[in-house]
């Protein structure tokens, strides 16, 4: 909108009208310059925040990669230990199936023994007297 209005086709604006329009335009230019300065300040702050966020994202990505490597290492160790345990269990079964068990008939008669009478027991069992001796 042009604040200068003229009547008629050939009429020129007066000096007062031109000065008034010039002051209005100068005020608009000053307001626009202030707005541009404010927007540049906001842009600078936004760019600094973006740079900070980018750095945080880079650090987080590095930490994530490190954690993933640690998880992979732990998974490999677990798999290795599971394999070792499985081999050990199979070996113990083979040993238990093939190892002879000595039969000692010190205190017991027959193939069945009490637990304490086992040659692998930690303690020595005292033989039980016969039932006939118990009755007397």
Image (tube, helix red, strand yellow):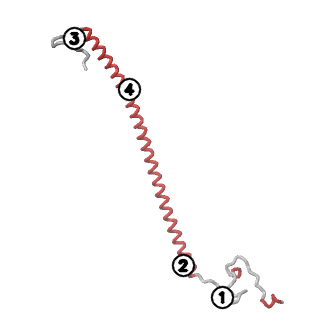
Residue sticking out furthest to the left: 10
Q: Are marks 2 and 3 in contact (CB under 8 Å)?
A: no
Above/below status of 133 relative to 25: below
Residue at mark 3? 13
Of circles 2 and 4, which is in front?
4
Nearest to the observer: residue 46 or residue 99: 46
Residue 38: which numbered mark, if any?
Answer: 4
Of circles 2 and 3, which is in front?
3
Q: Earlier in the sequence, mark 1 or mark 3?
A: 3
Q: Residue at x 34, y 19 (%)?
A: 30
Residue at mark 2? 94
Of circles 4 and 3, which is in front?
3
Of circles 1 and 3, which is in front?
3
Q: Residue at x 29, y 12 (%)?
A: 20
Nearest to the observer: residue 68 or residue 136: 136
Marks counted in the figure total 4
Nearest to the observer: residue 52 or residue 80: 52
Q: Position of residue 108 (x, y in %)?
A: 71, 87
Q: In what element is the residue under mark 2?
A: helix
Q: Position of residue 38 (x, y in %)?
A: 38, 26
- Distance between the alpha carbons at the discs numbered 4 and 1: 101 Å
Residue at mark 1? 111
Q: Earlier in the sequence, mark 4 or mark 1?
A: 4
- Distance between the alpha carbons at the discs numbered 2 and 3: 115 Å
Nearest to the observer: residue 85 or residue 112: 112
Q: Position of residue 1 (x, y in %)?
A: 25, 20
Q: In what element is the residue under mark 1?
A: loop
Residue sticking out furthest to the right: 136
């Amino acid at each position: 909108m042009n604040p200068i209005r003229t009547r008629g086709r050939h009429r020129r604006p007066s000096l007062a009208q031109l000065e008034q329009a010039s002051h209005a335009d100068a005020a608009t230019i000053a307001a626009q310059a202030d707005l541009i300065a404010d927007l540049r300040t906001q842009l600078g702050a936004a760019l600094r925040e973006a740079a900070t966020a980018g750095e945080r994202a880079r650090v987080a990505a590095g930490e994530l990669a490190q954690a993933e490597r640690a998880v992979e290492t732990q998974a490999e160790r677990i798999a290795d230990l599971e394999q070792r345990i499985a081999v050990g269990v199979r070996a113990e079964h083979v040993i238990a199936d093939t190892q002879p068990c000595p039969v000692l008939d010190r205190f017991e008669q027959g193939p069945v023994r009490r637990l304490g009478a086992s040659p692998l027991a930690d303690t020595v069992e005292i033989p039980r007297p016969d039932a006939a001796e118990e009755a007397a």
